[in-house]
């Protein structure tokens, strides 16, 4: 298209600046090659003919070319409007991807020096790229796109400001037990007191927050989206398992399933899950996370889970009758 446009511009310049009959203009145009007429070429060609007709005082030819020119212009404008409307109508959902930690908050660090903040950002960017390819009708919002610190409250605000339909927070797990392994997906649950002990102080709670108020708000939001969040967690867990098994033997993958816990970053007004993708404290899994192919599979698993969840949700929507 770029070559065609350059050729058309060159042709227009020739007809505009060179005094030659219309036949010569047509001959020059035919020399541009392959006789492919597109809207840009027709537009520029008609414009050059209008200019030449005006110079040679050939009103009939000039009027005819001007009419063709306006018709092409209207076709371009109409098509552009349709494309713009189509693009807007194609946006079926907004997914907020939250890369855990960042900036001064490095998160967990492995023995090999891998940092959680770098891994989560890398996977989040991969997820965004894959969604653009697999789900072009889905808008992706990242809470951070660089190595910068974003507070938990700000991450929640971003999700609300961007009117997110789904919230996915990406983290890497860590434990004092070097043998702890596997991946798991969490949805928010504050209904049971036993879960309050599982609040992840290390990476999911900021000092100075009003805990009791947050728990009350989280309880209300979790109740509104509990079922959807659980379905989302199950879908993502399945997606991760299916993708990772392509490169890692099932015996080496510890699928810890999906669970409920209190994570402040999940205090959002939409279906939300938090993923813990392997244990950076486990030497074997840290080596896995260092492998770009494994991180790509993690991203693919997350995207497959999101895609399947949105498809299932879309299928449940009531269909409008033809008469409506």
Image (spheres, rainbow, N blue to C red):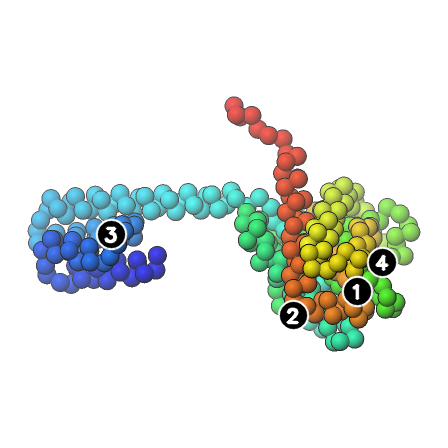
Query: Which mark is in front, 1 or 4?
Result: 1
Q: Residues within 10 Å of mark 2 (few under 14, many from 20)?
A: some
In the rendered view, tell whether residue 137 sits above or below residue 172: above
Q: Provide the residue designation for mark 1.
A: 279
Q: In the shown orientation, is residue 127 left or right of residue 65?
A: right
Dot 2 or dot 1: first in sequence order is 2
Image quadrant where residue 299 sits: bottom right
Q: Provide the residue designation for mark 3.
A: 35
* Marks 2/4: CA–CA distance: 25 Å
Q: Is residue 157 visible?
A: no
* Marks 2/3: CA–CA distance: 51 Å
Q: Please tell me whether mark 3 sits on a helix, a strand or a loop.
A: loop
Dot 3 or dot 4: first in sequence order is 3
Q: Position of residue 84 (x, y in %)?
A: 44, 46
Q: Provide the residue designation for mark 2.
A: 147
- Residue sitting at the far right: 194
* Marks 2/1: CA–CA distance: 21 Å
Q: Please tell me whether mark 4 sits on a helix, a strand or a loop.
A: loop
Q: Please tell me whether mark 1 sits on a helix, a strand or a loop.
A: strand
Q: Provide the residue designation for mark 4.
A: 199
* Marks 3/1: CA–CA distance: 61 Å
> Badges 2 and 1: C-beta atoms under 8 Å apart?
no
């Amino acid at each position: 298209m770029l070559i065609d446009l350059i050729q058309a511009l060159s042709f227009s310049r020739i007809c505009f600046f060179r005094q030659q009959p219309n036949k010569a203009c047509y001959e020059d145009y035919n020399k541009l090659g392959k006789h492919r007429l597109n809207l840009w070429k027709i537009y520029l060609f008609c414009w050059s003919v209008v200019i030449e007709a005006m110079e040679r005082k050939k009103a009939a030819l000039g009027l005819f070319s001007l009419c063709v020119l306006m018709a092409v212009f209207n076709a371009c404008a109409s098509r552009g409007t349709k494309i713009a409307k189509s693009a807007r109508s194609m946006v079926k959902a907004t997914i907020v991807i939250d890369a855990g930690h960042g900036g001064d908050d490095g998160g967990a660090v492995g023995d090999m020096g891998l940092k959680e903040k770098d891994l989560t950002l890398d996977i989040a960017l991969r997820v965004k790229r894959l969604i653009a390819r697999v789900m072009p009708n889905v808008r992706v919002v990242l809470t951070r796109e660089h190595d910068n610190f974003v507070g938990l409250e700000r991450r929640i605000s971003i999700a609300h400001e961007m009117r997110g339909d789904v919230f996915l927070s990406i983290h890497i797990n860590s434990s004092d037990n070097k043998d702890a392994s596997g991946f798991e997906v969490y949805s928010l649950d504050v209904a049971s007191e036993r879960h309050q002990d599982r609040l992840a102080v290390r990476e999911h709670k900021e000092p100075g927050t009003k805990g009791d108020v947050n728990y009350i708000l989280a309880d209300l939001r979790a109740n509104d989206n509990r079922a959807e969040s659980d379905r989302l967690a199950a879908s993502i867990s399945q997606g991760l398992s299916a993708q990772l098994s392509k490169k890692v033997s099932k015996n080496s993958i510890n699928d810890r399933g999906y669970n409920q816990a209190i994570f402040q970053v999940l205090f959002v007004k939409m279906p939300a899950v938090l993923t813990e993708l392997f244990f950076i404290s486990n030497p074997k899994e840290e080596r896995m996370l260092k492998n770009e192919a494994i991180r790509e599979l993690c991203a693919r698993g997350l995207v497959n889970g999101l895609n399947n969840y949105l498809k299932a949700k879309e299928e449940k929507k009531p269909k409008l009758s033809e008469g409506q």
